[in-house]
Amino acid sequence: MEDPDEAIGWANALDFGPVCYLYTRDLRTSIEGAERLEFGTVNVNNVGGGDVGFPYSGWKPSGLGSSWAGRAWQNTCAPRTSGSRWGTADRGR
């Protein structure tokens, strides 16, 4: 999909929001996309996720709450995890 606004609209229209993946070569697009996407985890140029040492939660009716967080925190925040990867996997070249 060429239009980022259309892609984000389609993604946010889903009923669930545990994790999503955004691929781009533009840093501004990655930051703005990660902020606008309604998902608990946003991976940019990265298929990782779930192996994190901080609160992890889906948005919308996804999941049963956040891991490693108290109930008060769950009721007042919408946690998000964002990950990104830039450059090549072979950094020796």
Image (cartoon, rainbow, N blue to C red):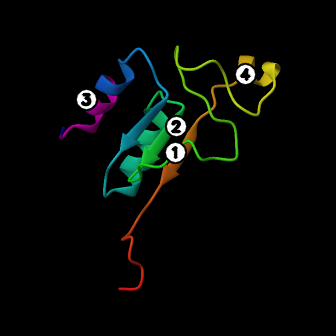
Amino acid on which disc 2 is placed = Thr
**Quick one: SS at disc 2?**
strand
Q: Nearer the viewer, mark 2 or mark 1?
A: 1
Determine which residue is flagged by label 3. Answer: 6
Where in the figure is residue 53, as x and y percent of width and height?
69, 47
**Quick one: SS at disc 1?**
loop
Q: Which of pointers 3 and 1 lies earlier in the amino acid sequence?
A: 3
Q: Nearer the viewer, mark 2 or mark 3?
A: 2
**Quick one: SS at disc 4?**
helix
Determine which residue is flagged by label 4. Answer: 74
Question: Does residue 23 sit above or below 63 in this rendering?
Answer: below
**Residues under labels 2 and 1: Cα distance?**
7 Å
Determine which residue is flagged by label 1. Answer: 49
Q: Main secondary structure of the magenta part?
A: helix
Q: Which of pointers 4 and 3 lies earlier in the amino acid sequence?
A: 3
Determine which residue is flagged by label 2. Answer: 41
Amino acid on which disc 3 is placed = Glu
Q: Please rate how many residues cluster around mark 1, counting C-alpha atoms within 10 Å: few if below 14, some from 14 to 19, many from 20.
A: some
Amino acid on which disc 4 is placed = Gln
Figure quadrant of the C terminus = bottom left
Where in the figure is residue 24, as x and y percent of width and height?
31, 52
Q: Are marks 2 and 1 in contact (CB under 8 Å)?
A: yes
Q: Which of pointers 2 and 4 lies earlier in the amino acid sequence?
A: 2
Q: Nearer the viewer, mark 3 or mark 1?
A: 1
Q: Is residue 19 left or right of residue 75?
A: left
Where does the magenta region start and end?
Answer: 2-9
Where in the figure is residue 16, as x and y percent of width and height?
44, 19
**Residues under labels 3 and 1: Cα distance?**
24 Å
Amino acid on which disc 1 is placed = Gly
Q: Are marks 4 and 3 in contact (CB under 8 Å)?
A: no
**Quick one: SS at disc 3?**
helix
